[in-house]
Amino acid sequence: MTGQRQIFTKAFRRVAVHLSRESTCTVRDIAEDLGMALSTLSRWRV
């Protein structure tokens, strides 16, 4: 990360969570592909 906080839209969050639940890839791989932290995507999935 660049040290600056990223801002994600609600639509992006929905798509990211959907991808992480429906894909055969790991959550870590999805987060990397989307350019975001694994911890952020993991929080959204709860």
Image (tube, rainbow, N blue to C red):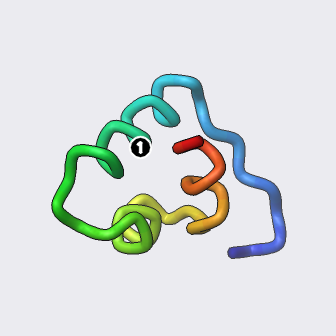
Question: Which residue occupies 42% across, 41% down?
Answer: 17
Point 47% across, 24% down: residue:
11
Q: How many marks?
A: 1
Vertical comparison of 2 with 42: above or below: below
- For disc 1, the marked residue is 16
- The location of residue 44, given as percent across then percent down, is 59, 42
13 with respect to 23 (left or right): right
- Position of the C terminus, as image quadrant, is top right
Assign the N terminus to one quadrant of the image: bottom right
Residue under the image location 80 percent in, 56 percent down: 5
Q: Is residue 15 above or below residue 45?
A: above
Among the 4 quarters of the image, the one containing residue 32: bottom left
Above/below status of 16 relative to 12: below
Local crowd size for mark 1, using a 10 Å CA cut-off: few (<14), some (14–19), many (≥20): some
Q: Residue at the location (22% across, 45% down)?
A: 22
Q: Amino acid at mark 1?
A: Ala
Q: Is residue 20 left or right of residue 39?
A: left
Q: Secondary structure at mark 1?
A: helix
- The image shows residue 38, relative to residue 19, as above or below, that is below
Front-lying residue, 34 or 26? 26
The percent position of residue 29, horizontal first and vertical second, equals 35, 72
